[in-house]
Amino acid sequence: MSINLLSKIPLFSSLPLEELDRLLNLLGALNLQDGEILFNEGDLGEVFYVVLEGELEILKLESGVDELLLNVLQAGEYLGEMSLIMPGGHRTATARARGAVTLLSMNRDQFLALNQRHPEISNWMAKVLSQRLDATNVATFRDLKEKNRQLQTAYDELKAAQAQIIEKERLERELQVAADIQLSILPDELPETDGINFGACMVPARQVGGDFYDVFTITEKHIGVLIGDVADKGVPSALFMARTHALIMAEADLDLLPGEVMRLVNKHITRLQKSSQFVTVLYGILNLENNEFSYARAGHEPPLLLHANGSVERIPHSAGMAIGLWEDVTLDERVVKLTRGDTLLMYTDGMTDCRNPHGEAFGLERIKNLLSGLAEQSAQQVCDKLLETLQGYQAGSKQDDDVTLVAIKVK
């Protein structure tokens, strides 16, 4: 190492040549590899170091894992002077090599002797210490400012997430109330007579849906049967369903024919309607004396008739219009004579449109084939078996539409 190299280090640049020559003979050289630790925080400080070549990282290690980089010393800078000025002092940070590093080392006795011969070194060190303190204050303030910004961002995000959770919980409570209201509209139990039994089931695609059904007594000898499907799903459809159901029930109490009831309901809805929603409905009246089921169908799926011998037919039908589209509605009005052992099945299109994981619809033919083997079952058993088979076919794939079934069985 040459004297010229020492003279380029600011700490020694003011020293005379003979002093630099003496330092060359006294100071020890130390080489570090990349990542090698010079000393750790808390070690006893007995040596003063000058960076001759390379870079030395000064850092804090927290929990042995996280680290905070305080400074990077370049060639010509030094460290460890406080440990020499304060006997028994300990290192306040960890020093680690960044790449290959060459250092000069000076012990306490050498350091004190040099300061006695050249007091100007102490002045230089005091100046550097002041600069380091200012730099540390600036860095600390910058770090605190950044941490405050991060904390504020985290607080704002937490506050927004909390608001979303509160809103989500509120919506869930409202949906549950809507679901409870919808269930309250459906009959608690179905009528039972000596010669007829009824069955029904419904599975909404969402928490609330647009399908509905009802089986209710009109007179001692007449029972009303209703099934409907509002376009779309969710809360708007549920509200429209509730209105339609209430209107049908109100008009049915007047003991009108099914077609008359449907026309009155359509008149009310088109007069009140301020949206594009509509509903397909099948409403019929079963005469318990002769087992004739007279019904009006407004755009709904035609019913299926299962005979006692297992044969299945789709009731002949003509064009019909959904309720809520136009003031003048075209209905499909028919009378079906049910004989002993017959089962009449009414359903919404969620049954036929239900798809398996491959995207294949359940379809009408599967319903008919399945239905043909249920001639000995009760009306409720028919509905339950159809729904069970449908859910097995679905095999966990998304349900796109509400599914509702209503059955009438002549014992």
Image (spheres, grey):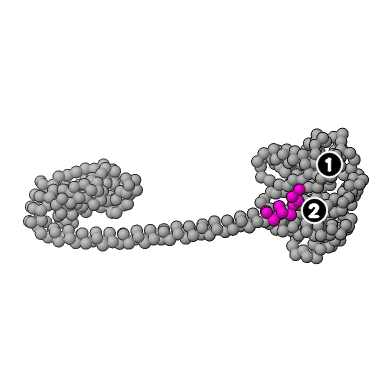
Q: From the viewer's perspective, is 32 left or right of 107?
A: right
Amino acid bearing label 1: Lys
For the point 85% across and 50% down, the residue is: 223
Residue 50: image location, x then y, percent: 19, 50
Picture layout, residue 22 above or below residue 128:
above
Amino acid bearing label 2: Thr
Residue corresponding to mark 1: 409
**Magenta segment: does it hold 180?**
yes
In the image, which residues are magenta? 179-189
For the point 71% across and 42% down, the residue is: 355
Residue 130: image location, x then y, percent: 21, 62
Residue corresponding to mark 2: 280
For the point 24% across and 43% down, the residue is: 32
Choose the circle earlier in sequence order: 1 or 2.
2
**137 or 152, nearer to the observer:** 152
Which corner quadrant holds the C terminus?
top right
Q: Main secondary structure of the magenta part?
A: helix
Tag 2 secondary structure = strand
**111 or 184, nearer to the observer:** 184
**336 or 369, nearer to the observer:** 336
